[in-house]
Structures are given as structure tokens and as C-alpha cells.
């Protein structure tokens, strides 16, 4: 049997120096191409053994680089490599695929099940998270890991396929709310087929105007009057059936098509407001969502400028919402975007505020106009005393920073009354209205205008 199965870690073998660029200069690990060759040799000589491939990335690693500098980020990566080598007695090979993405292959003991190995990796990740958060001053740092295991039932798989399966499981893990570990299974391939099917239909759906803009009203707490709305996208097929956002948004974000869908929604909203203004009808500010994909190219600023040139509406009728996680993932780019939008006279809000752990640090750095308190704080119909304290503190903080506060997810009168009591300026949620089609929202605007006219007439 090959010495790959000897149980010794080969990565830092003094005799194995970087010859001809075969090693990663930062970590000393094998380059990915070398890793694949070693893994393939192992799979060809696997015998009765099981081999695991563990694919891990460090969630919010870019925030470390942006906040503390690349030296700190590089130190974290080197620490991670040391941990991999120390924690894996039967490591075959390991590689940094790119940036903070690592892949490692191991021989599994005969007496361990796939689930037990997955639980072990999850336990190790949890321990690392605690340690790294303390050392690198980042309470959001998480490890997202996918595992693919080759056994007697999958001997025919080649190295690239095994790594691809582990990476697919890692992507599933990354979509979950918390960093976690996911074991690959064949059902995930069905998800890939579904993703390909959905993404292939997007261009035609855009050209056929199958995407519809729905509006969820924002209510002024003091008066309970309609004061704005959030534009949300819905996909209605020609047969009248709907594809719900959670069934296509993640797919088109990964494919980059979210940019085209966002631009479609932006244009629809600008045109909607422009037509109502031209007709002398009532309008309110509308907020538009920004995907993290926009930060990679920053073309959004040019597109918004073109819309203002085409549709003569006041910039104070438009607001852009960026989720807290976008700011964390790419703080400097987010800051550039916020400044660019502010230069056009457009307001910017931080959506899902409080869902993470670095919100206060972000507010001190970013010129935000509105914070939208995450609906998780209103998860129960009855507010607990601890919930009230947290919400009240965030609203007070926003007042002191001269930032408008809006609370999402309002579903009961008790919640609404409490938000009024503590001075939260805006509210949004099913207690007032779910997202509604444009025609229904126009009726709401017309009714609000009529009610305002009657009040002034009295």
C-alpha cells in the first residue's frame, strides 16, 4: 500500500521544499493541482479504506482583511493551516484552493461512521470559531464546511468530482444562517439541476415581463400614516403560477443574474413614480434592495444615474437597502457605494440591522440614513422584557446618531404600540400590510391622498 496511508502528515516534510512553484507561498501547502494528483493516487489505491475530502472556507474573512489589514488576515490563514495539520492524524494532503478556501483529504478510521466524522468536524470548527474570534477580534467569524466521503459504493469517482461534491456541500452550508458542516449526498445534485433550470429561464422571464414589483408599505409610527414602501420582486409565470423568491433568488445571486433582475425592478419603480407624478397623483419614497453581487463591479451607480436622467423624479423618493452582511463582507466597497448614492441625493438604509454581531462597529464607520431593525426581534407575538430592552437601546442609539429607525416584522398591535412608546419612527409588517401588487398599492396611495385631503378640508 502507498505511503500516502502511513498516517504521517506530509505537508511540512523538510525534504518537500517548494520546487518550481509546487507550494503555496503563503501557507506552504501543496498547490491545488498537486493536491488533485495526490488525491487521485490515493483513490486509485484506496483498497477497503474510506477517504474524506473536507472543503472549508472562512465566513466573513474579507471583513478581517478590510478591518484589521492583510497581515492579520494572513496570520489567521497560517494559524488555520497549523490547526488542520494538528487535528488530522491521517491527513493525505491539503491545499489552499484560493483566498480562504481550503481542501483536505483524510483516511478515515475503520470504526467511524460518516455521520460521526461529520459531527467531529463540526465540533472542531466550533472550537476554532471560539478561539479565533477571541484572537482576531471578530465575533462573526465562522467556518463553513462541506464533506464528501468515498467508500466502496463510490470507488469510481475521480478526484475532481469528489472535491466538487465537497464544495457543493460547502455551498449548502454557507447558505444556512450559521456556519456549519454539511455532508454531501446525491440529492444535492437534484438541487443543481433545479438551479440550472431556473437560471436558464431568467432572460426570457425578464423580456416577457414575468417579474412583478410588489410593494410593502412603511408606516409612520406617530401618525400611522403611509409614508413609504419597499419594492420586492415576485415571479409570475404565464400560466399565473408564482415562483417564490426563496426558490430563485439564491440561484440568480450565484449566477450573477440578480443584477439584471434588480435593474428591471429599479426601472419599473422609477417609471411607476414618474408616471404618477406626471399625472399629479400622490407618491411616497420607495426603497430598493441591493444584492452583494453589485459590489463586485460597482456598475450600479452608473445605472442609477441613467435612470435619474431618463425619469425626472426627485432623489428623495428613492432609497437603497443594503443588508448588514453586505457591509460586513466588503466594507470598503459598501462605503464607496453609499458615498456614490449620497452624492446623487439618495438615502441608504442598513437592512437586517442587529442580525449580526458587528452592527455598532459598522454604524461608527458608515454614513447610514436608516436602520431597519431585523424582524428576529419581533419573533414572538408577545414581547419579552429582554426583547424590549434590546429594541429600545437600538432605537435610542439611532436617535443619538441622528439615524431614522424602522422596525420590520410588526404583526401585532402590542408590538406596534410598544414601538410608538419608545419612539421608533417607522414600522413595516403584516400588521399593516403584506407586500401587495402595484395596482393595489396605487389604490392605497390614492386612498391616503383622499384621506389627507379630507383632513385638511376639515
Image: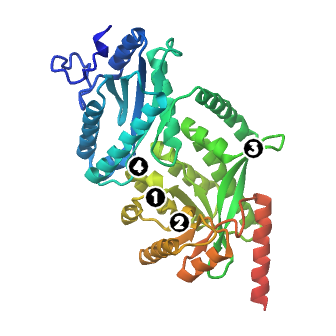
Percent x, y of residue 73? 28, 43
Which sits in the foreground, 153 or 405?
Answer: 153
Foreground mark, 4 or 3, reads 4
For residue 140, above or below residue 379 = above
Which sits in the foreground, 447 or 112?
Answer: 112
Quarter where residue 209 is shown: top right
Foreground mark, 2 or 3, reads 2
Which residue is at a point 51% across and 44% down the rendered structure image?
Answer: 293
Distance, label 1 to label 4, CA atoms, is 12 Å
State the residue position of label 4: 330
Count of numbered labels shown in the rendering:
4
Q: Label 3 neighbourhood size at 10 Å, few (<14), some (14-19), many (20+)?
A: few
State the residue position of label 2: 373
Residue 280 appears in the picture as rendered:
no
Q: Could you tell me if the residues under marks 2 and 3 are in contact, i.e. CB atoms within 8 Å?
A: no
Q: Secondary structure at mark 4?
A: loop
The N terminus appears in which quarter of the rendering?
A: top left
Q: Label 1 neighbourhood size at 10 Å, few (<14), some (14-19), many (20+)?
A: many
Distance, label 4 to label 3, CA atoms, is 32 Å
Which residue is at a point 46% across and 61% down the rendered structure image?
Answer: 343
Foreground mark, 2 or 4, reads 2
Which residue is at a point 31% across and 23% down the rendered structure image?
Answer: 90
The C terminus appears in which quarter of the rendering?
A: bottom right
Distance, label 2 to label 3, CA atoms, is 32 Å
Q: Could you tell me if the residues under marks 1 and 2 are in contact, i.e. CB atoms within 8 Å?
A: no
State the residue position of label 1: 338
Percent x, y of residue 284? 67, 69
Quarter where residue 226 is shown: bottom right
Which sits in the foreground, 33 or 264?
Answer: 33
State the residue position of label 3: 209
Amino acid at each position: 500500500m502507498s505511503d500516502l496511508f502511513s498516517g504521517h502528515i506530509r505537508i511540512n516534510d523538510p525534504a518537500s521544499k517548494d520546487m518550481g512553484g509546487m507550494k503555496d507561498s503563503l501557507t506552504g501547502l501543496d498547490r491545488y493541482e498537486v493536491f488533485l494528483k495526490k488525491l487521485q493516487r490515493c483513490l486509485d489505491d484506496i483498497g477497503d479504506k474510506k477517504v474524506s475530502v473536507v472543503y472549508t472556507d472562512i465566513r466573513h474573512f474579507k471583513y478581517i482583511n478590510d478591518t484589521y489589514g492583510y497581515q492579520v488576515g494572513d496570520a489567521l490563514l497560517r494559524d488555520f493551516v497549523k490547526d488542520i495539520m494538528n487535528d488530522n492524524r491521517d491527513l493525505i494532503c491539503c491545499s489552499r484552493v484560493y483566498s480562504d478556501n481550503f481542501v483536505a483529504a483524510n483516511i478515515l478510521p475503520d470504526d467511524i461512521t460518516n455521520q460521526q466524522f461529520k459531527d467531529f468536524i463540526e465540533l472542531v470548527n466550533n472550537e476554532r470559531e471560539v478561539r479565533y474570534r477571541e484572537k482576531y477580534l471578530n465575533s462573526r467569524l465562522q467556518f463553513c464546511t462541506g464533506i464528501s466521503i468515498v467508500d466502496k459504493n463510490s470507488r469510481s469517482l475521480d478526484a475532481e468530482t469528489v472535491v466538487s461534491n465537497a464544495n457543493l456541500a460547502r455551498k449548502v452550508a454557507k447558505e444556512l444562517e450559521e456556519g456549519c458542516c454539511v455532508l454531501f449526498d446525491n440529492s444535492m445534485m437534484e438541487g443543481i439541476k433545479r438551479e440550472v433550470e431556473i437560471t436558464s429561464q431568467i432572460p426570457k422571464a425578464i423580456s416577457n415581463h414575468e417579474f412583478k414589483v410588489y410593494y410593502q408599505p412603511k408606516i409612520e409610527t406617530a401618525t400611522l400614516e403611509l409614508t413609504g414602501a419597499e419594492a420586492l420582486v415576485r415571479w409570475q409565470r404565464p400560466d399565473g403560477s408564482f415562483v417564490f423568491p426563496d426558490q430563485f433568488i439564491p440561484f440568480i445571486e450565484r449566477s450573477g443574474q440578480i443584477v439584471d433582475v434588480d435593474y428591471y425592478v429599479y426601472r419599473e419603480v422609477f417609471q411607476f413614480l414618474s408616471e404618477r407624478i406626471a399625472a399629479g397623483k400622490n407618491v411616497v419614497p420607495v426603497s430598493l434592495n441591493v444584492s452583494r453581487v453589485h459590489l463586485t463591479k460597482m456598475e450600479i451607480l452608473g445605472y442609477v444615474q441613467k435612470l435619474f436622467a431618463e425619469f425626472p423624479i426627485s432623489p428623495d423618493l428613492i432609497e437603497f437597502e443594503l443588508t448588514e452582511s453586505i457591509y460586513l463582507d466588503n466594507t470598503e466597497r459598501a462605503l464607496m457605494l453609499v458615498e456614490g448614492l449620497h452624492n446623487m441625493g439618495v438615502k441608504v438604509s442598513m437592512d437586517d440591522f442587529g442580525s449580526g454581531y458587528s452592527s455598532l462597529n459598522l454604524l461608527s464607520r458608515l454614513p447610514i440614513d436608516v436602520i431597519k431593525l431585523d424582524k428576529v426581534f419581533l419573533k414572538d407575538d408577545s414581547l419579552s422584557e429582554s426583547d424590549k430592552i434590546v429594541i429600545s437601546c437600538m432605537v435610542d442609539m439611532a436617535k443619538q446618531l441622528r439615524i431614522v429607525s424602522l422596525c420590520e416584522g410588526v404583526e401585532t398591535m402590542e408590538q406596534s404600540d410598544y414601538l410608538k412608546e419608545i419612539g421608533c419612527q417607522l414600522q413595516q409588517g403584516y400588521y399593516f400590510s403584506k407586500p401587495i401588487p402595484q395596482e393595489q398599492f396605487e389604490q392605497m396611495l390614492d386612498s391616503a391622498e383622499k384621506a389627507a385631503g379630507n383632513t385638511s378640508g376639515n
